[in-house]
Image (tube, helix red, strand yellow):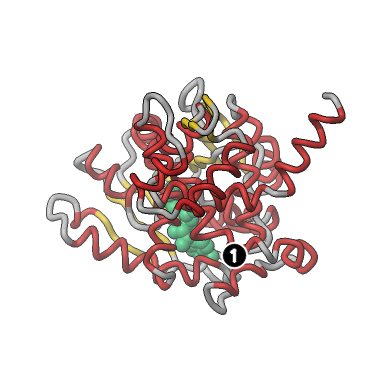
Amino acid sequence: MKAISALYEAQKIIFSPFIFQAVYSMSELGILDALNNSKSGLSFVEISEQTNVSKYGVTVLVEMAESAGIVDEIAPGKFLLSKIGYFILRDEMTQVNMKFTQDVCYNGLFFLKDAITDGSPKGLKVFGDWKTVYEGLSKLPTEVKKSWFDFDHFYSDNSFSDALPIIFKNRPKLIFDIGGNTGKWAIASTNFDSDVQVKIFDLPGQLSVAKATIEKNDTIKNRISFQEIDVLNPTSVIPGGADVYWMSQFLDCFSEYEIESILLKIKANASPNSTIYIMETFLDNQVFPAAKLSLAATSLYFTAIANGNSRMYSSRTLKYIIEKAGLKCINEYNLHQDSFHTILEVKLV
Ligand SMILES: C[S@@+](CC[C@H](N)C(=O)[O-])C[C@H]1O[C@@H](n2cnc3c(N)ncnc32)[C@H](O)[C@@H]1O
């Protein structure tokens, strides 16, 4: 890379909060839509007329977007959305990531350096006085909560249909869904198999949301039960009796040491016939650079806002912890060639 290009890239990084806020505003104010709907390009005045945003507002936003490659000036004073701008507007993953960044992370990330030096989620104070985001999840402002759940569900829901045949290959009768959140997996799996029973383990706030949703569903509600647990409480117990212990996007909420202690809690009571399935998006299993970058960013959300000590892991690290806990990873399923998700099948040795 030539020095002049490196200097340009450096400015894009340094001014990235400006670029992000400009793009977010353009998305919310309908400017990206207007630019996308035009065939021959729009002037500042035309954009202003179509969106009811002042000409001044349109000018400063579009000039930033043009400098950052989100908008192209196709003729003097005429602008169209670039391919990058199109993906910001239309790609679902990008939209989910943008809302999550703005609503959940933006203010808290200001405290990232403090979070790193202190080892605690210093940015969480923008929402409340909790030790982890999970304690406060059900109490977050509505928009923030929506963006959090949209982000969480986008990355797990899409994988459930591929995960179900793997988890059900030995027809489990009882599944413990640890960190079952709003019950999406419990609903998907009881719909998939008409005999299976699922017990959701989670913190009280999340369990009450799951209960409220599941109680409305007469066909499955009798096969789903609930157990409050704080897996970080040293006295908490994960009981035996399940054929499958299912943890989807759960272990990334904890430090390496905490993951080992959770696995040991399962091992203490599980039978050798039971199987532990861990579904994660691993850094080292990603095909696309966009996915890898999203995961690295998600780690910083954990650092600054969620809990201060967890991250998105590589499969290598998780397998090391599994072995350290005296368990054995017997299979690894990459859900698609280009999938974000991997399932590790783990047994007691
Ligand atoms: C990222 S969400 C994953 C939810 C779901 N399994 C999925 O695949 O979408 C993590 C879940 O772990 C739960 N959790 C976090 N810390 C916990 C703790 N200390 N004890 C029990 N559950 C916890 C959260 O409440 C949340 O529901």
Give the quadrant of the C terminus: top right
SS class of the residue under badge 1?
helix
Q: Position of residue 231 (x, y in %)?
A: 54, 64
Above or below 26: residue 203: below
Q: Amino acid at mark 1?
A: Asn
Tell whether circle 1 marks a residue whose Cβ is less than 8 angstroms from ligand 1. Answer: no
Residue with the mark numbered 1: 107
Q: Position of residue 33 (x, y in %)?
A: 37, 39
Above or below 194: residue 125: below
Q: Residue at x 42, y 34 (%)?
A: 42
Give the quadrant of the N terminus: top right
Q: Position of residue 345 (x, y in %)?
A: 52, 35
Q: Residue furthest bottom?
A: 129
- Compare residues 323 and 78 and report the one nearer the observer: 78
Q: Position of residue 57 (x, y in %)?
A: 50, 54
Q: Residue at x 60, y 63 (%)?
A: 305
